[in-house]
Amino acid sequence: MARWQGQLIRVDDYRWKIPKDYKTGMRVPGLIYASERMLESMREEQTPEQVANVAFLPGILGYSLAMPDIHWGYGFPIGGVAATNIKDGVVSPGGVGYDINCGVRLLRTDLSEAEVRPRIHELVDELFLNVPSGLGSEGKIKINQKEMDRLVVEGARWAVRRGLGSEEDLDVTEEQGCLTGADPRKISDRAIKRGAFQAGTLGSGNHFLEVQVVKEVFDSHIADALGIADTGQVLVLIHTGSRGFGHQVCTDHLRVMEQAVSKYGINLPDRQLACAPIESPEGQDYLAAMACAANYAWANRQCIAHWVRESFARIFGKSPDKLGMRQVYDVAHNIAKIEEHIIDGRKVKVCVHRKGATRSFPAGHKDIPECYREVGQPVLVPGDMGRRSFIAVGTEKAMSDSFGSTCHGAGRVLSRGAAKRSVKGADVMRQLENRGIIVKTGSIFDLAEEASQAYKDVTEIIDVVHQAGISRKIAMAVPVGVIKG
Amino acid sequence: MTKGFEILDHTADIGIIAYGTDIEQLFSNAAVALFSLITEVENVDEKLHFNLRVRSQDRDSLLVEWLNELIYLFDAKHVLVRRCDIEDLAHNELKATCHGEAFDPMRHKIKRGIKAATYHMLKLDRDDGGYRAQVILDI
């Protein structure tokens, strides 16, 4: 791929603008959050071109935004944020992605590294047994069509009703684990067939379950409010989404959108950006189906969190309550949300597409749980398997500058093929074990694809969003045990 | 035509480039390329034979729909395909007979899951004496 030659105008140390006149058809300029040293690899990967392409979407407001973990995606870049006016703007399934409501859930514990290290092998084995993972993995829950209809409307609550978790979990989940407007009539039979036996499974690819230890606390007051007391504390991070169900919802509605593009006379530089006006039947149908998939993902993470707690209880011989296994938060990082934002001093209802980006609402915002009202919404940023993850909180600056959004993870730098050519799965496992990280996976072949070298260092990413002020870093944790699908 | 397909390396995803002396062969090779990413196709026996029919709005999107049909087949019905005969291919519709078998964890190694075939960077062109197509897959 040829290096991208367009103009990137420095706004400040962490923001770079693609002028609106870079390409005819752009409705707003592009804005990339990055440090200067990140720019070259972005140019080589051609990602600014995708940021410019997103600026073609009718009704897009402000900027076509890109987070520092941006990488080349299909249509939309991964790490892209686009807000469209709900009155005359569009919704684009490509701006959400195939893995609708792929997201992260964090549990805290009262356990220390010293208590967990000696039993880490047993614990990882138990988690691997209890949480179905890997390709073709079938869930422990068997669901018929009627039950699926309930699941996709209720989201995480569906699982809580079945005894998998508690009301308190819902309080600390984005949207309380249930996006309104979900309509099972907008879901195809195929999506149901793909999803029915995958509920309550981790899946494969970049999805994982990690036992982590807090290594650094940057703000002890806020960390304390999140339930993170000090270094050495053990946490559990769950990263998964809506599985085949969400993929099929995206596939089905992209097909509809393909036709909508010509029906509504929308001019796009890439077919994968296919979209329809939010207020059109096609747009409304997609949002209703997307909400179903988002709810499926929240139910999925809710089930998995419950089995994680059970596994800990079995290994440590105490109830999850006694182990202090409270949920810190659960965020979606592939989603479109209808939100209110202030634009030129006026409140405007917008559809915020976050594809590989996390909501980052500040202290005092009405949509964040009571318990975090004073500190801001927790933002969970997983790194790659061998390195570290960050916990941050949302800020006012995110509201004014980035439609309440920030980064979502590390972002790939090597293709899966290149990662496999540079390292073998078995070697990755050995290297991690040498560093005290125990990995259990159904497919050692896939492990090389997720090797640290394949990803940007999440530390650089978090530093950019912290310095730019769109989220504030609170703590950093490193893995000691990993389950990979 | 000696090679039926190639695999294209893409940072976040993976792609296939399929060839064919005619458009039917190209569609058939694209199917084999897809299953070669999922499993070791040489270990798939031809025990099941079934017909598929796919429709779309134009020829380019027909290729995407065709691959999405096969992805669904594996993900929802756990069927692996070794070979496809494209029997009828009009501008926006195709009929095919596929040969393969049900996934057997004892004999089939699954290399990776595939979420979908995308329209991103989709190309289907004439290429000296035949056809060439490129499809990016989300994995």
Image: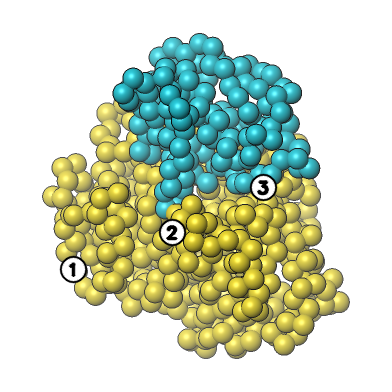
Chain colours: A yellow, B cyan
* Amino acid at dot 3: Leu
- Image location of residue B64, percent across then percent down: 46, 30
Mark 1 surroundings: few (<14), some (14-19) or many (≥20) residues within 10 A: some
Q: Residue at x 64, y 51 (%)?
A: A203
Label 3 crowding class (10 Å Cα cut-off): few <14, some 14-19, many 20+?
many
Instruction: Name which residue lies at 16% across and 58% down.
Output: A7
Q: Mark 2 points at which residue?
A: A414
Q: Which residue is drawn at 68% across and 26% down?
A: B100
Q: Is residue A450 above or below residue A463?
A: above
Whether label 3 touches label 2, CB < 8 Å: no
Check disc 2 and report its element: helix, strand or loop: loop
Q: How crowded is mark 2: few (under 14 residues within 10 Å), some or many (20 or more)?
A: many
Whether A292 is drawn above or below A355: the answer is above
Residue A304 appears left or right of A319: left
What is the secondary structure assignment of the residue under circle 3? loop
The circle drawn on residue A135 is 3
| Distance between the alpha carbons at the discs numbered 1 and 3 | 44 Å
**Mark 1: which amino acid?**
Arg
Q: In this view, does B3 lie to the left or right of A448?
A: left
Q: Do labels 1 and 2 share a chain?
A: yes
Residue A336 pos. (x, y %): 44, 50
Using the image as rendered, state which of residue A414 and residue A481 is in the foreground: A414
Could you tell which of marks 1 and 3 lies nearer the N-terminus?
Answer: 1
Q: Which label lies toward us, 1 or 2?
A: 2
The reply to whether residue A185 is in sight is no
Q: Name which residue type carries label 2.
A: Leu
Tag 1 secondary structure: strand
